[in-house]
Each structure stands twice: as structure tokens, then as C-alpha cells.
Amino acid sequence: MARQERGGGRRERREELPERQFQWVVPKGRKATVYEDITLDTQPSVHRFLHNGYFVSYPDGRGTWDDDSTALDVLGWHAFRDPAELWERPYYQQGAQCEREIEAATQGARADGLLAGIDPSWIEFLRRDGQIPAFLEHGIWSITTRRSRAALSDVLTHAIVLYAAMKQRQAQALVIEGMDLDADFGDITIEAAKDRWRTEPAWQPTRALIERLGTITDWGELLVVTGLIVEPLLGGAVRRELLMRGALAAGDPITPVVARNAQREGRWWQDLTTAFGRFVLTDAAHGDANRELLHVWREDWEPEALAALDALEPIFAGGGVDFTTARDRVRTDQEAVLAEAGLVDAPAGATA
Amino acid sequence: MATPTHRRRSVTRTHERIAQLGWDRDYHEPVPIYDTRYVFPDSAKDPMKQIMREYLPMQLEKDDRLYGGFDAALRADMPTKADERWLEVMKPLILILVFAEGAAGRCMSVVMDVVPNEELLNGYHVQFVDEVRHIGLQMGLARWYTKNTPDPAGWHNGQEFMSNNLITRAGVNMFSHAFTGDPIAAGITMMSVIETAFTNIAFVALPDVGARNGDFIQATTYSSVQSDEARHISNGYATMLTMLQRDENVPLIENDLQQAWWSVHAWVDPFVGAIMEYFSTDRSDEESYLNKWDRWIRDDWYRSYVEQLGKLGVDIPPTLFDRARERLVDGLVHKTAPLAFAMWPLNFWRFDPLTEKDFEWLEKTTPGWYDEYGATWEAYAALADPAEGALLLAGLLEGAPPMCWSCMLACVIDHDMCHRVCEDRHGVERTRFYCSPECRWIDESNPGRYTGDRNYFDRHHGKALSELIIESKLIRSDGKTLVGQPHLKQEGMWTIDHIRACDFTVTSPNIVSAEAMGLPSGSWHDPSDLHGAVQADGNGFKPIRVDHDDRVANPLTSMAAAAAGGKNWVAL
Ligand SMILES: [Fe+2]
Ligand SMILES: [Fe+2]
Ligand SMILES: [Zn+2]
């Protein structure tokens, strides 16, 4: 209620009445943002306002929400904020913008006759592997959307839901691109892509990894593993190094737009998960235990993710992309992500 | 030569391709974190198709229109033109509906965790995104009211008030059923009952009342919300048809649909009924809540949905439906209202005395209303002025019926009220009251479900009302005026000193009733527990003993029996 005093002798503005503000909102900055006002404590908990406990529980004793839904612990999950403050309206603005850009690129390429200029070997690549990353995105979606409910604050739940929605959009954009190219070049089917996703040896370690994500029962682990390991290594390699760079070199005017929009969304998740890493690692009471746990998770997932990445070498070769350079790039990126999250020291010479 | 630059993609063909994104797992099967009693057929029924390329711009356009509407409403000076009585009830209504939206979204996540059928998953997921949208829209509306309407008190600490108010906490209880427990039962609660039956009442009929009271921004917001519900209803129907392909599921659906129906009715009907019938200053609408209920719930839901399920092998006797309607005819809304309104010092909204016009309308729509309830409302009016120095609550709480363990509202229908004696974890006998045999059946047949310090008054038994108000933070920023008021005037507002002068001590009707009936303690409050709850029938605790018959001697066995198809209905 201290804000009543602000402004000294100035006539109190209407909005500055304490009753005209959501007093339960603890703003991160000086003043609550719209995002904070419309998001915070929309998921009440026994730590925030449900003073009488949970009224409905599971037969096994778990409450409506369960503090043990993640092995991580912090003094209060409600203090975590999405650095980008994403809420429904900007989400729809950005998502619709992504789809508009892709649609415009597709129509423009056709109108300007650019499709004819695409390197034929790249078309072959797209026919073979262009839609396979859609399975990767869809696989991440399918676990993410299942873990959103258990997360221990509104901010976290909404972020996980919107991340899942982005994964779904990205997967569908690749499939629609394949469908469009099929109309122009023929013989580009989702069935063939699925078959290859399920049988091609080079893709199998990736598929096994994505399937294994589906075994994650801890939403905190899911944030850490996707944000700090799988996305920077595999997502970055496939979207940016393979699809975007490969397409740019081959004169493909559509794929880079599809990939770039996915990357833009990916940066939001990266910022969010690195902020999440810092949040749990700097927790005054549980930071050390969380650090140990994050190291365990990293050891548990990173070698498998790297092995999956290494197995993609022939796929990169098929797309005319130098694998060693790509691998070095994403490895450096991931180290920067881990440093940003506070899990490792910043690599020498890094600017991030 | 003209090159076709924009070939129209067929939605069906696009969807066919997108539907191929799922694959059979070979390396690792997904691990769910929730358990279900249901079994799943190999192939599912398709809900409405969703493609992000169509979905995103469609939702954006709706958002743009709505948020533009907020500005337009300001320019049109709606905040001061809308009826103030109506604006007051938006405080509890919108905040509990925001919780409901969160419940609906989270329901999708629990359902997705157990449903293996890829065809259904995308629809569920898109619904969760919709529900995040609905939270944004309605919190945006709450924020708009807070910034612009004449008296924002109550909004300022709304989330905390909502979680703890007698009426809205019972709503938290009810909506929690929609994302806690068996995911498919939760899905039936949300999609087949709340969304299919009640969103028409909450998002269509209610905003119409709002518009009659000069609040068109509420109507605009809710019609934008409702525009997504067709998809959600379609998810519910596809889920239902999918589950019905396996005979083993039929008794589960019969059980879960009836229980969900009852739990939702038990809270939504008195709450929304009271809003419609008491909070409208405009009396141009000839329809009572029951008239609207007959149209939206009986005709549009029960007759065209539940009865039709009979053709698909689901045997749902009309009993529980008829019983709910009978309770409305018996005065569920009007009997719940007096205590709820007499509780005004503990509410985070204001309500003014009923006027002559209100009396006339209520008598006309509910003949006999005046004889039964008129005196209470006259007393409410007479005591609205703090100079009178008396509280209606003081007169009402003494003889008030106990609160129902399951639905958490008062047991207002005398001949329906029942109880049972259970042992707590220490083997101490305590009495649970229920508003109806149905609420008792639901408690008995769902061991471990109902937890927390449920009876609102137990924890405050023997406490000065003034102390409870302060503890509940129901004081305005001047440090003395109450948030809740029994009138809408700016002068003559009640302060905490007025309450102190009344010297009223809160008692728990559950404790008082149990004592009067010679039953073991009616209190389920334990001050030594972290959340004040007497721990009772959670998993691993002693099974509950039933006081009069042995239908539920061991709830775990009877739940298993229900799951195996043994009917477990309440004999009425
Ligand atoms: Fe909704
Ligand atoms: Fe919905
Ligand atoms: Zn009840």
C-alpha cells in the first residue's frame, strides 16, 4: 500500500488508489505489467491463498497440485517470471505473424517463379528428409502438453502450454510446406517421411531420444532437458544448421522462412528456460541441491542427445551441409546456454 | 502464362497429413503420471479439426475485436452507466470463472496424459491454448473493471478473497473435480457437463442479464469466450464416443457422468441462479432461472445429449436429473441466498437491499416467494444502516443449516439433508453433513477425494466476527471501512468499529447441529494441521464406517465394484 504515498502533494490519480490495483500481484519491476496482472495467481495453491488446503485430491494422496511433481525445490514457485512476459494476446499476434510470413513466402515464391531455381539435389533432400523434423517437434509437443498441468505456478503452466503450441505450429508448418511442395514437385508425402523417421538408421537415435522424453514425469526436468539440452543441440542443428543454411545455399525461398520463425519462437523458450535455470540455481534454500540435480539430468540426457546429433551426419551430407561445422556451432551455442542458465562457467571468449 | 500462386489447401487434406504426425513408439512408451480406470479402443472418433495456420489468425482477430471493445466501452462511459449492483457481482463471478478456465485447460493436460488416441490429442491441446486465452480475456476484464468502475474494492485482493470466500471456495472445490482424480472422469466433468450443459447458462444467458443492466463489455467478452466452446463440446463428444467403443467403460461413464452432473449442479445452480435472480436491477426479463434452466439444461443438454446417449448403450436413469430440478423447484436458489447475503461482511462485493420492483419480480416469477422469504429481505433492508447496530447474520447463523461436506454449500433443503459418522485418522468419530443423499454418495464412493478444511465455519467457531474480517483482510485501504457492504451508497458504509459494536461471535452450524442432534463432533477443523484439516479418508487411512447401512462399508472395494460394473446408485 506504499504506492499511495507516491507523487507527494500531487492529486492522487484514480488508478493509484490501492483498490484500483491487484494487490496480490508482486511486480517484478516498479509497476505490475499487464502480463503480471492477468497471469499471476490465476493458479492458486496452498502456498498462495488456498489457506484451507486442497479441497480435491487424488486417491493416492496427491493434492490438486503436488509439490513433489518436480524434484526441484525453491522457496516459492510463484516468484518465477517469463522474461518475455508472453500472454495470450502477444502469443496469437506472434503465432499468426509466423504463419503469415510463411504463407507470403510460399505464395511469393510461386508468383515470382522462384521454385524453378531451387537446386534439384536440395529438392531431393526435402523429399527425403524435409518433413522429418516435424516428427521431432511433434514428439516434443506430445510430452510437453501432458506435463503442463502439473507445473507449480500459472506462469510456468502457461509457458509450457504456449511452448507446446509453438512446437505444434512448427510441426504443422513443416507438414504444410511438404504438402505445398508436393503440389509443385510431386512425390513428397508425409507417409514416406514417417516411414523414414521410423526406419532410417541415421534418424533412429533422434527418434529414441524423443520417445524417451515421453517418459519424463517431472515437469522441471522437462524444462531443463528441452531448454538446455535437446533444443540447443538437436533443435538448433536441424532447424538452423540443416534446414535454414542448407536451403539458403540451395536457393530455396520457403524453408528458411519456416525455420527462421521456428528459431524465433525457440529463442523465447531458450530465454525462459535459462531464466528458469538461474531461478532454481540461485534459490537461497535449495540452489545447491538443484544444481546437483541439474548436473544429474545433464549427465543423463546430454550424451544421448550428442550421440543422436552425431548420428545425423549422413543426413547433413545429403543436404549438402558440412556437419563438423554445424556440430561445432551448436555445441558452442549449447555451452553458452548452459552458462546463461548458470549451470557452467561462461566459456572463454563468449560474449553471451 | 498465369501461374496459380495460391492454391487453396483443403482443410480435410491438410488435416489428414497433420494427423500422420503421431507414430507408434518402439523405443520408449510414454509414462503417464495419472491413473485412469478406463480402457481405450484402437481408434478414436475425430473431434473438430484444428490447424494452427487457420486457428492462430482466427483467434487473433477475435482478440483484436474484444480488446478494441474494452476501449470503446470506456469511451462510451460504460463504467458509470452500467448498473452498480450488477458490477458488484462481477467480482466473485469473474474470478471463479477464471479458476474454471484454468481447470478446463488443465483438464486437457490430464486427459492427454492417458488417452493414447492421436486423433483426439490435437483437439485437446488446442483447447488448452483456448483456455489460456480465456484466462487472459477474463482477467483483462477484471482489470478493466478494477481500473474503471465506481467502486473497485474487492477486486484489489480478488484472488485471495476468491480462494477463501464461503461461496467461491465451494466453486474452487467443484471446478477442481475437472482436473483432479481419474482423468477421464475429469474430462467428463469438464467437457460433457460443465461445457456442454452449463456454458450456455454462464456465457450466453448470464451476459444477456448483464446487457440488460447496461454492461455490454461482459457480454462481449463472454461471447468471445463462448465462440471457442463449440470446439470444446466437440472434444467432449468425441471423447464420449471413443470411450463407448469399449463395453468396460459403460458403467464407468454412467457413474462418472451422474456424479459430475450432481457436483456441478450443486454449486452452479445456486450460484448462477442467485446472480441472475438477485443481482439484476433490470426486471424486464420475464424468465426465472428455472425457465432458462429448462431451456438450456433440460432441453438442450439433458434431452438432446444425455437421453441420446441411451441409444449408444449408456443407461442413465433420469433420477439425478429430476432430483436436481426438484431442488430448484424446492427453492435451492432462494433458500441459499439469505445466508449468502447475510454473510455480507465476509463477502468481497456489495449488495443492496431488494426494492419493491425486485419483490414484485421475484413474486411473479416464483409465486409464493414473498411469504417464504420476504421477511428476511425486509430485515436485510432494515439492518443495512450501521446506525441500527445489528447484523442479520447474527439472527441467521444461529439456526443455519450445516454446510455440506461434498459441495460445501449449506444444506438448505431440510428433507434432503443427511449425515454420517466417520472416523478420522486417530479413530475419533466425527459427523459429516450432506445437503443430499447424492452428495453423501459421492463422498462415500470417492475415497481420498475430499480433503482440506472444508466446513467454512469450523475454523472460526467462537471467533469474533470483527477478528475474522480483519484476518480475511476484508478492510479497505482507509484501514476501517469494510469491503463488503449491505448497500451501494457511498455514505453510511460499515466500518470495523460498527462490527465490533455488534459484538457478534461466529459459530459453526456444523458443530452446533451435531451437538443439537446428539451426534459426535461436527467439526473437521484441526488447528494443529498445516492447513487446518482433520485428515480423514485419504489413501492409507481407515476406511469409513457408515452409520445406517453397509453399502459403503469399505469404499475402496465399492469403488472397485463400481468400476467392474456394479451399480452403486443412491436409492432415493
Ligand atoms: Fe474456457
Ligand atoms: Fe472451454
Ligand atoms: Zn452437497
Image (cartoon, coloured by chain):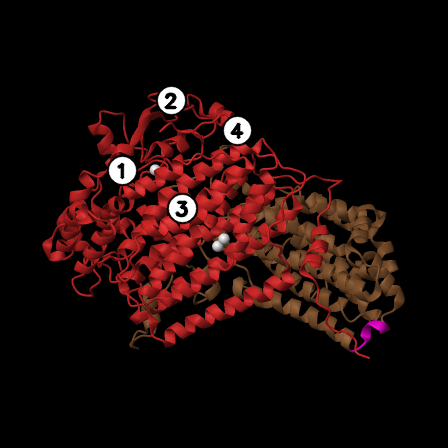
Chain colours: A brown, B red
Q: Amino acid at mark 2?
A: Arg
Residue linked to disc 1: B413
In the rendered view, would you say A110 is above or below B28?
below
Chain-order first, disc 3 or disc 4: 3
- Distance from mark 1 CB to nearest ligand 3 atom below 8 Å: no
Q: CA distance from mark 1 to mark 4?
A: 31 Å
Q: Amino acid at mark 3?
A: Arg
In the rendered view, would you say B39 is above or below A332?
above
- Specify the farthest residue to the front: B311
Determine whether the residue tagged by mark 2 lies in a helix, strand or loop.
loop
Q: Amino acid at mark 4?
A: Ala
Q: Nearer the viewer, mark 1 or mark 2?
A: 1
Q: Position of residue B192 (x, y in %)?
A: 49, 45
Chain-order first, disc 1 or disc 4: 1
Q: CA distance from mark 1 to mark 2?
A: 25 Å
Q: Quick one: B252 or B348, which is closer to the camera?
A: B252
Q: Quick one: B353 or B572, which is closer to the camera?
A: B572
Q: Residue at x 34, y 71 (%)?
A: B78
Determine whether the residue tagged by mark 1 lies in a helix, strand or loop.
loop
Q: Nearer the viewer, mark 2 or mark 3?
A: 3
Q: Amino acid at mark 1?
A: Ile
Q: Quick one: B542 or B254, which is closer to the camera?
A: B254
Q: Position of residue B502 (x, y in %)?
A: 14, 49
* Picture quadrant of ligand 3: top left
Residue linked to disc 2: B545
